[in-house]
Amino acid sequence: MSNGMTPLGSVVVPKGLQTGPFGSQLKAEEYTDNGVPVVMPKDISGGKILLDGAARVPEEKAKKLAKHRLMSGDILFPRRGDLGRIAVVTQESAGCICGSGCLRARLKDEVDTGYIHQYVQMPFVNLWLERHALGQTMLNLNTEILADLPIFIIPKNEQVVIAKLLSIWDAAIEKAERLISVKETLFTAVIQNTIGNRSGAWEQLQTQEIFKPVSEKRNGSVELLSVTQDRGVIPRAMLEGRVMSPEGSTDGYKLIKRGDFAISLRSFQGGIEYSDYQGLISPAYTVLRPKRKIDTDFFKHFFKSYLFIEKYLSISVIGIRDGKQISVPDFMTVKIPVPPLAEQKRIAAILSTARQEIDLLGKQADAYRRQKRGLMQKLLSGQWKVKISEEVVNE
C-alpha cells in the first residue's frame, strides 16, 4: 500500500462498510434484560463502547443477525447526530450486534486498527464528516459518504508504532480520569460527613436571610465575565473558542463582585455559581451578595454539592431535562443549614484542600490531552516520521 491519503473505503474488507439492520426498528417487547447487546451511538462515549445501558435482544434473534455481529477491531461511526461518537470494538464488545444507528468499518489486515482508531479521533475527521454529512438540523452519514473519508496511510509497521506511542498517552489520561472519579466519590463522602450528617444540629435559615439580590448597573468599562457551570464566574478571556461580545452599550449589565454568587440560567450542576472576580455579567442573571458574615468558600462548595442539589435546590427548580431552571423567588425561601462561622471556616478548609487535589488531577489530564493532540497532528499527518525497531513492532 503506497503512502498518502486514501479513502477509507479502500482499506475495508469487501462489504465491510455496513450498518446494522434494525436497532430502533425493534418493538419494545422484543428487548430482553440478559440478551445480546445492540450497540447504538448512545452507547459510545469517549471513544469507548459502554454496554451497561445498551438495549439487548434474545440470543435466538441475535443468531439470525450473524453478519451484523461486531468483531474486535471494527470501527463504529454514528449515522446521525453527534458525529464525534466514534469507537473501536474491543474484545469486551465483540459479538454484540451493530445497531441501525451505527455504520461499521471492518478493516483489511494490512491496516492497523489502533492506528485508524487514533486517526479518526483527529479534529480534522469530525470537521470533514460534518462538512460532507447530509441534512442541516440533524446531520446524517451513509456508507457512501464514509467510504470517501480521507485517511493518511503509511506502512503498517509505522502504523503500529504510532498507535503504541499514542496509547501511552491514552493510558495516562485514563489513569488520571480514574483518579478524578475516585476523588470525586471521596469528596461526596466528605460533604456528607462534614455537612449532611451534622446539618440537623445547625441553624436553618431561608436563603433570603443570608443573601440579598443586587442589581448594580452603569459601571463603565469593567471587565466582562461569563457564568459557567463548571468553573463559576470567570473572565470571558479564559473561555476557549469564540465568545460573542455584546452589541452596543453594557449599561444594562450587572456588576458582580468577588464573593458574590450568580444564579445561572440553567441548573445542570447546581446553578449557583461563585465569583472570584469583579466584572459585568448579563442582566439575565441574578446576583446574590451575602448580607451577613459568612465564609463564602463554605457556600461555594455546598452549592455545588450533590447534597444541596438533591435535598435543597430541587424544590425550587422548574421545568424538565434540558429546560430546568431555578425559580429565584422559590430559591430565596428555601431553608438551608448554616453552621457557626468558625465551623464554616473549618469545613471550607477541608473541602478546599480536597477540591484542589481534584483540580490538579484535572489539569494534569488536560495537559496529557494537549500533548496527545500535538503528537497526533505531527504523527498522523506525516510531518514527523517514526523510527522502527523490531522489538517495538512485535512486543
Image (tube, rainbow, N blue to C red):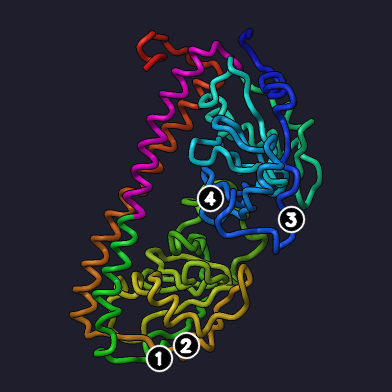
Label 4 vs label 2: CA separation?
42 Å
- Closer to the camera in the image, 274 or 108: 108
Label 3 vs label 1: CA separation?
51 Å
The residue type indicated by label 4 comes to: Leu
- Closer to the camera in the image, 284 or 313: 313
Please tell me whether mark 1 sits on a helix, a strand or a loop.
Answer: strand
Q: How many marks?
A: 4
Identify the residue under disc 3. 26
**Which residue is at 66% across, 48% downward?**
60
Specify which label sits upstream in the sequence, 4 or 1.
4
Identify the residue under disc 2. 332
Q: Position of residue 90 (x, y in %)?
A: 51, 36
Specify which label sits upstream in the sequence, 2 or 1.
1
Q: Is residue 31 magenta?
A: no
Please tell me whether mark 4 sits on a helix, a strand or a loop.
Answer: loop
Query: Counting other residues with Cα less than 10 Å from the Cα at mark 2, is it few (<14), some (14-19), or many (20 or more)?
Result: some
Query: Which of label 4 and label 2 is nearer to you?
Result: 4
Instruction: Classify 139 as above or below 89.
Output: below
Please tell me whether mark 3 sits on a helix, a strand or a loop.
Answer: loop
Please tell me whether mark 2 sits on a helix, a strand or a loop.
Answer: helix
Numbered range of the magenta stretch: 153-181
Q: Tag on residue 206? A: 1
Specify which label sits upstream in the sequence, 4 or 2.
4
Is the residue under label 1 in contact with that under label 4 (CB below 8 Å)? no
Q: Is residue 380 left or right of residue 349?
A: right
Specify which label sits upstream in the sequence, 3 or 4.
3
**Which residue is at 63% across, 9% downward?**
1
The residue type indicated by label 1 comes to: Gln
Query: Which of label 4 and label 1 is nearer to you?
Result: 4
